[in-house]
Amino acid sequence: MSAPVLLVGTRKGLLTFTREGDRWALSGEDFPGVEVEFACRDPRDGTLWGALHHGHWGPKLHRKRPGGEWEELTSPAYPDDTGAALEHLWVVQPGHADRPGQLWIGTNPGGLFRSDDGGDSWTLVRSLWDHPSREKWFGGGRDSAGIHSIVVDPRDPDHLYIAVSCAGVFETRDGGESWAPANQGVKAPFLPDPDAPFGQDPHFVAACAAAPDVLWQQNHIGVYRSTDGSGSWTPISQDDGPVGFGFPIAAHPQLPGTAWVVPATADTQRAASDRKVRVYRTDDGGQSWRPQTHGLPQAQAWDLVYRHALDVDGSGDGVAFGSTTGNLWTSDDGGEHWRCVGNHLPPVYSVRFG
Amino acid sequence: MPVVHLTPNLRAAYPDLRDVDELVVEGDTAAAVVAALDARFPGLGHYLVDERGRLRKHVNLFVDGELIGDRQALSDAVGPDTPVHIIQALSGG
């Protein structure tokens, strides 16, 4: 396996950072000038994935196998009878370790695509597209609903969660044959019925790898945690602090009580709360949060962190995030100390360890 | 047969097209011209139209100097030896 990398998708291309001693150093710039909405490395085989969005030419999917070059693949396409067309490739999720070649992609408008051949071909998951709730899905921030979170249960390749803005969290236990909304306890005050079974606006959902029944959700209206595999969600926002609105959330891979968020001032501003860049960490399942600001600007900062732009590595010690203001920070001690990797990057869309 | 001129911006995405100023392809409609381009350069059509065959929002297609009228189905007629210009709209930042 190659050396660890930090893949940073930006408005102006894909930036790759590699580890040099105790620092991350820029080692590659791909797709210059093109929006890279998401990029990741498949931990199973080291393949790199890039979800591009050309301003003129539309979304394009790229793959780079170990030792190879980037290649453009045939993008997922909606079947004719849907009347839909691909707008965004929003997230690429490698499948379960026992399903080599299986990958999932979340798209706008509201599509989940699956590949069983390493990305050479993609099929729309019709059971989700045809879900009875679909006519009530709507866009949040974009004109169409979009799927941005895909969680594969490490214990069961047929057990997945997805999150949709705006429709909420959905769960399948049969590999995508059927789906059920999983939003019990999550409020949707922007709907006529705030307790509706679907219509919520999750911004991102992540699971603890070592305890996959523990799920974390940064929602438009606050932060939630589930300890029973999405059977119910408990609100864990701060009553008197900034932890509430935001986009990303990262789950510690081993400690089910630990997660990180980067709050922002809701939704009228969408900028750093109090103009300070602050990561908040909980170690008690969200009962309390503490700011982690050592090395981060604490004045005159408007940085907003998008939903895919915060990540934690497999050890739980490496944490990284990037902002719309083109800043990138990393930590080697779980967020206690931050080091700025770059101040003048393009707006950052995604940050992923690989 | 129609003579297609592609914007350099698009040719940059296809290494085989980088030094090609014009392409002669078959087709009597704008849609047929796009299909002919895609047949010669697989995937190129997806740069111009979505999977419903609609011209992408920020792509302009001129037939004999006139912007096509049917961006949904690209049914505009293309005569023999007619110049077709495919240009990116000036947009973005």
Image (tube, coloured by chain):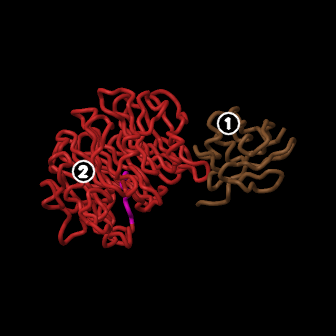
Q: Secondary structure at mark 2?
A: loop
Please give the range of residues in magenta.
A303-309
Residue at position x 24%, y 45% in the image: A207
What secondary structure characterizes most of the magenta part?
loop
Query: x%, y% of residue B9?
Result: 68, 48
The chain identifier of the residue carrying mark 2 reads A
Identify residue type, mark 1. Asp
Label 2 Cα crowd, 10 Å radius (few <14 / some 14-19 / many 20+): many
Residue B29 in view (yes/no): yes
Query: x%, y% of residue A315?
Result: 23, 40
Residue A298 in view (yes/no): no
Which quadrant of the rendered structure holds the C terminus of chain A? top left
Q: Nearer the viewer, residue A287 or B83?
A: B83
Q: Secondary structure at mark 1?
A: helix
Res B38 label: 1
Query: x%, y% of residue A119?
Result: 46, 32
Residue at position x 37%, y 68% in the image: A271
What is the residue that sits farthest to the right in this orientation?
B81
Which quadrant of the rendered structure holds the N terminus of chain A? top left
Q: Among the chains, which one is brown?
A: B
Q: Is residue B92 left or right of residue A305?
A: right
Whether residue A141 is situated above or below residue A46 in the rendered picture: below
**Pointers 1 and 2 in contact (C-beta within 8 Å):** no
Residue position for label 2: A182
Whether residue A130 is situated above or below residue A295 in the rendered picture: above
Residue at position x 32%, y 64% in the image: A277
Res B66 label: none
The chain identifier of the residue carrying mark 1 reads B
Q: Is residue A14 left or right of residue B79?
A: left
Identify residue type, mark 2. Ala
Q: Among the chains, which one is red?
A: A
